[in-house]
Image: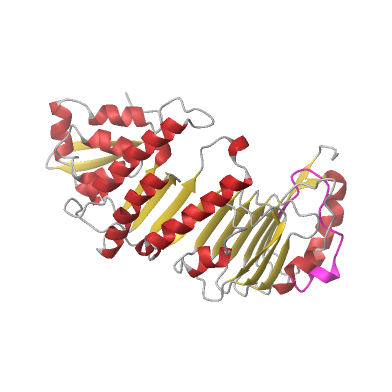
Amino acid sequence: MDSPMAEKATESKGNEQVVIVIGTDLGYLTGVALSAAFEEDRLSVLPDDVLLSILRKVDISTAARTSSPSTRWRQLPWLLPELNIDVSCFLPAPRSDPIEANDMQEAMVALTKATRSLLSKPHRGSTTTRLDLVIYLINTFLSDLGPLVGDAVDCGLLKDLDLTIHDGTDALDRNEEYMLQRAQDIYGFFTAYPSVLHCLTKLSLYNVCFSELDINRVLFDSCKELKHLFLIYCDTGRHTLCKIDAPNSKLSVLEIHFCRFEMLELVCLPKLEKLTWYHWLSEYSPLLLCYVPSLGELELSSALTLKHVPFKLSEVLHGTTSIHTLTLDFQGEKLWMQPEMKQLCTAFNKLRKLSVCGIFVEFDIIWTTAFLVAAPSIEILCIEVTCAVPV
């Protein structure tokens, strides 16, 4: 019986046709791999690229379990050019919320073991072009993972690292002292294992406070190859200015979610192409763009709270010259923008796509007209109107 979420491909050998089932139903896939000698023979006729295409569709722990019984599959995980090692795959099911400390410890033990095995030079049959590594910030494991990843970089086995430092603790335990310690631990990790930074191209951080450390030194001076930065529930001290001045940075994508910056000032990010800010706490304009000549995509999404004062979008966009895609999401609340038309013409000069979401129904015609007048070269206009009455 076919998996309900499966794709089929065929591979011919002589007069024989083998049907390959590639699906997202992990239980079904594991069942296929664990079948008896007949299935073993069928697998043995398939080329590596077909089997690798199957392994790419499952997480690393499932791939390891699937390959164990089959001699044909056994060496395949070491041939994968891209590895995704996520600590959540090693957590027990059902998963608790928040994650129990013991569960995080055991998951990191399993993750470290898997990383050591998959990055082992004698086993690897090819270079790993990309490693997506999701971990918990536990120092005892950082001292193991740092040398493992660093050695893989130094040996030329690893070219590209996407690192996510997650947080499974209870939200009530994430006070300022806790977030400050996370910043110190991350900086200590970067300092102790500089080889890791040579291929660190994407970094995602949760619950980190940089008030006692210079965010420019930690994230930009240290991580010279960083191209994508994702900050979630981070700050530089509650309700303080976050100033990024990184003229030599290669950063092209910056995503900020629920960060407690009073204002984000981008003094200099010459390679930045896309900026997303989801939900800010600033009372006034949350963003100041100075030198961002490559910025082409901007997404701003937040609800208007009682303390927010509407600001002029033209003032936010004052330092931009190349924006071609703009998304504004008001989350079904009142507008956090002041009415403008002529003032937006300069900023909208190269605008090709504009999406306005969560706008209150009474404002749709007014704002649509204003945007069309300000952006004469627009090609795509998306308007999403909410019928809910804003508070």
Between 223 and 70, the one lying in front of the other is 223
| 348 over 235 or under it: above or below | below
Between 159 and 20, the one lying in front of the other is 159
Which picture quadrant has residue 12? top left
Quadrant of the drawing holding the C terminus? top right
Q: Name the colour scheme.
A: secondary structure
Q: Mark yes or no: residue 4 visible.
A: yes
Between 303 and 341, the one lying in front of the other is 303
| 331 over 276 or under it: above or below | above
Question: Residue 8: horizontal and vertical position, in percent?
Answer: 32, 37
Is 345 in the magenta? Answer: yes
Q: Is residue 263 left or right of residue 125?
A: right
Give the magenta-colored segment's residue range: 328-347
Q: Residue at x 24, y 43 (%)?
A: 51
Q: Main secondary structure of the magenta part?
A: loop
Q: Is residue 242 left or right of residue 8?
A: right
Q: Residue at x 33, y 45 (%)?
A: 56
Question: Residue 318: horizontal and vertical position, in percent?
Answer: 75, 72
